[in-house]
């Protein structure tokens, strides 16, 4: 069964709206979660690493003020797309490592399809 | 530069027609090669992890193998429900941490 839950699965909203996406680890604690973005027929691109109790680490080219990440508990990370515009429309996916160790496999949520009108 | 290359980009098979997907990688110090399956509109589903050359893993009709330069995902007697995009990924060391980098995937279509 699923080990990572992501909500909502789809969002359609007007330009200028802020959108929050939740990512939960279901039966384990995740001190680190990851946020990816995927464009049609392309692979996953890491946006940021979410660290419980500390600031997120953003990849080069990702705007920190645009994509706000909060990892307030060991089972929940949130990504807020602030003042979203049509160019922010994409498929956003989160992941978490279930086991201990940096090289354990990541398990992914089912993604959030964001459409900005 | 560390990178992952998958081939073919797309593959069409008849049901029962076995084949292999390729994942070539260049990375300094492999820390695991991962195979995922992704269905349209869904997140990737974890399939296998391979850590050292010569290692093999199997799950139903899928078998993953690893050499020092590449990994193969063998699909034996595929069924239409095996249709999906298959992604491979490796860890790349960046600054003081490791990040997962993905290949572009192979889109598999199995016809009944």
Image: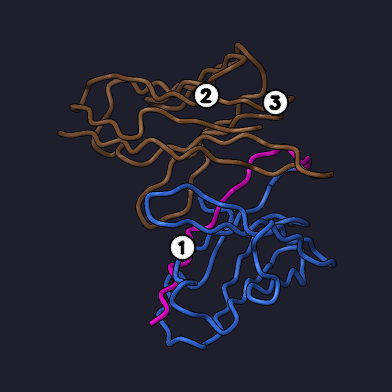
Q: Secondary structure at mark 1?
A: strand
Residue at which label 1 appears:
A91
Looking at the image, the residue that sits furthest to the top is B54
Q: Write the residue at 22% across / 27% down.
A: B13
Q: Is residue A114 above or below residue B75?
A: below
Q: Is residue B95 above or below residue A52?
A: above
Q: Position of residue A87 (x, y in %)?
A: 46, 72
Q: CA distance from mark 2 to mark 1?
A: 26 Å
Residue A100: mark: none
Q: Is residue B38 above or below residue B60?
A: below
Q: Is residue B55 above or below residue A65?
A: above
Residue B67 sits inside the magenta stretch:
no
Read off the magenta span.
A100-117
Q: Secondary structure at mark 3?
A: loop
- Chain assignment, label 1: A
Residue B30: mark: 3
Q: Residues within 10 Å of mark 3 (few under 14, many from 20)?
A: some
| Closer-to-camera residue (B24/B42) | B24
- Chain assignment, label 2: B
The chain painted blue is A
Nearer the observer, disc 3 or disc 2? 2
Marks 2 and 1 on same chain: no
- Assess whether mark 3 and mark 1 are in contact (beta carbons under 8 angstroms): no
Q: Quarter of the image holding residue A73? A: bottom right
Q: CA distance from mark 1 to mark 3?
A: 29 Å
């Amino acid at each position: 069964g699923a080990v990572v839950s992501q909500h909502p699965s789809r969002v359609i909203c007007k330009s200028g709206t802020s959108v929050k996406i939740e990512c939960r680890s279901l039966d384990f604690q995740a001190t680190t979660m990851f946020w990816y973005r995927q464009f049609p027929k392309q692979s996953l691109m890491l946006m940021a690493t979410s660290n419980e109790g500390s600031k997120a680490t953003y990849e080069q080219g990702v705007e920190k003020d645009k994509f706000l990440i909060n990892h307030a508990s060991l089972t929940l990370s949130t990504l807020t797309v602030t003042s979203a515009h049509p160019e922010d429309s994409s498929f956003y996916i989160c992941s978490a490592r279930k086991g201990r160790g940096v090289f354990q496999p990541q398990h992914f949520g089912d993604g959030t399809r964001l459409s900005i009108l | 530069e560390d990178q992952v290359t998958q081939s073919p980009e797309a593959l069409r098979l008849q049901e029962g027609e076995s084949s292999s997907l390729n994942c070539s990688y260049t990375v300094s110090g492999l820390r695991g090669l991962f195979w995922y399956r992704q269905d349209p509109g869904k997140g990737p589903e974890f399939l296998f992890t391979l850590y050292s050359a010569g290692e093999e893993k199997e799950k139903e009709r899928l078998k993953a193998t690893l050499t020092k330069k590449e990994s193969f995902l063998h699909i034996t007697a595929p069924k239409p429900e095996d249709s999906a995009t298959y992604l491979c990924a490796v860890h790349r060391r960046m600054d003081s941490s490791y990040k997962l980098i993905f290949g572009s995937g192979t889109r598999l279509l199995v016809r009944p």
